[in-house]
Image (cartoon, rainbow, N blue to C red):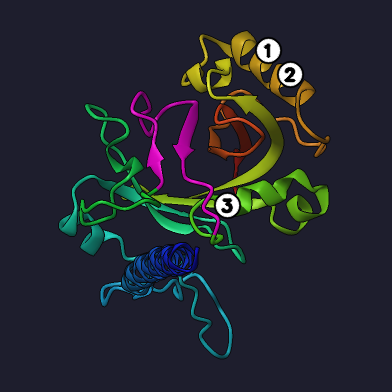
């Protein structure tokens, strides 16, 4: 009996040690991934030397320097040609590069920027999308440590939406701003994920009306035909097929 107790104690100790090691390894890996993204953020936030200011059209006693908000994405494009831009929701943890690989849409589901295995992956544009589409769909993981698209789940609260109404998406074409107009619980096979381009104005309006009808709350915003939409999607819910999507309409401010 004594030997059995000793064996059970040793077994329990081994299991605790193994579990502790796994937790340590996971935390360490996640921290390294965060540091790598911090590095990328520092790169894109560096203002290029050739950035031009717009002082010519301003007549004041002292020149006022106006710099259009722009990230330095060129180094990222050179480092990985799969990168097409940067997604950011100010004052949240969402601040990442965006990848696009139409021939292998989910390549970055479990890969980091350097194409190494990563549980967190990187946000990526739907493989069926083009930057000219009516509805750009970007996917990102809902990580337990609050990274990637985890903050999207906060949009189920209307106050959070009011405090964080604008999504920034910048590509080689420039910076676009999108105002959140709908937050919706969906399944992974929802028809919204098949909406890339409207057939005509009526089709666009019908899709907007339907998605607003299903929204968690009314933002009072209704996109008009010609406004590009941006859909951010992440896992959220009781089953593996549950999702939450946050949809913005292109704005000019």
Q: Is residue 142 magenta?
A: yes
Q: CA distance from mark 3 to mark 1?
A: 30 Å
205 relative to 26 in the view: left or right: right
**Residue stretch rendered in magenta on the structure:** 123-144
| Figure quadrant of residue 76 | bottom left
Q: CA distance from mark 2 to mark 3?
A: 27 Å
Q: Which mark is residue 206?
A: 1
The relative height of residue 4 versus residue 173 in the rendered view (above or below) is: below
Circle 2 packing at 10 Å, graded few (<14), some (14-19), many (20+), is few
Which mark is first along the chain, 1 or 3? 3
Q: Which mark is residue 150?
A: 3
Q: Looking at this view, name the residue that lies furthest to the front.
A: 1
Q: Is residue 128 magenta?
A: yes
Q: Looking at this view, name the residue that lies furthest to the bottom.
A: 62
Q: Residue at 42% x, 57% y: name it.
A: 96
Q: CA distance from mark 1 to mark 2?
A: 5 Å
Q: Secondary structure at mark 2?
A: helix
Where residue 205 appears, as percent x and y from the top left, is 67, 16
Which mark is first along the chain, 3 or 2? 3
Q: Residue at 61% x, 23% y: name it.
A: 225
Circle 1 packing at 10 Å, graded few (<14), some (14-19), many (20+), is few
Circle 3 packing at 10 Å, graded few (<14), some (14-19), many (20+), is many
Q: Which mark is residue 209?
A: 2
Disc 1 to disc 2: CB gap under 8 Å: yes
């Amino acid at each position: 009996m004594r030997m059995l107790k000793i064996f059970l104690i040793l077994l329990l100790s081994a299991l605790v040690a193994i579990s502790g090691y796994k937790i340590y390894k996971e935390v360490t890996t996640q921290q390294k991934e965060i540091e790598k993204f911090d590095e990328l953020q520092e790169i894109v936030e560096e203002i290029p030397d050739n950035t031009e200011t717009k002082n010519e059209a301003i007549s004041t006693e002292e020149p006022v320097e106006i710099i259009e908000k722009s990230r330095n994405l060129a180094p990222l494009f050179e480092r990985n040609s799969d990168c097409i831009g940067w997604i950011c929701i100010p004052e949240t943890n969402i601040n990442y590069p965006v990848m696009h690989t139409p021939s292998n849409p989910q390549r970055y589901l479990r890969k980091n920027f350097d194409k190494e295995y990563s549980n967190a992956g990187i946000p990526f544009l739907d493989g069926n999308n083009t930057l000219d589409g009516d509805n750009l769909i970007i996917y990102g993981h809902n990580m337990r440590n609050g990274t990637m698209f985890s903050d999207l789940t906060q949009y189920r609260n209307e106050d959070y939406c009011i405090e964080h109404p604008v999504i920034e998406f910048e590509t080689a074409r420039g910076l676009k701003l999108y105002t959140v107009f709908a937050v919706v619980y969906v399944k992974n096979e929802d028809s919204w994920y098949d909406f890339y381009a409207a057939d005509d104005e009526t089709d666009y309006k019908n899709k907007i009306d339907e998605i607003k009808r299903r929204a968690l709350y009314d933002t009072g915003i209704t996109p008009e035909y010609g406004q590009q939409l941006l859909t951010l999607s992440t896992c959220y819910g009781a089953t593996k097929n549950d999702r939450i999507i946050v949809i913005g309409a292109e704005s000019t401010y």
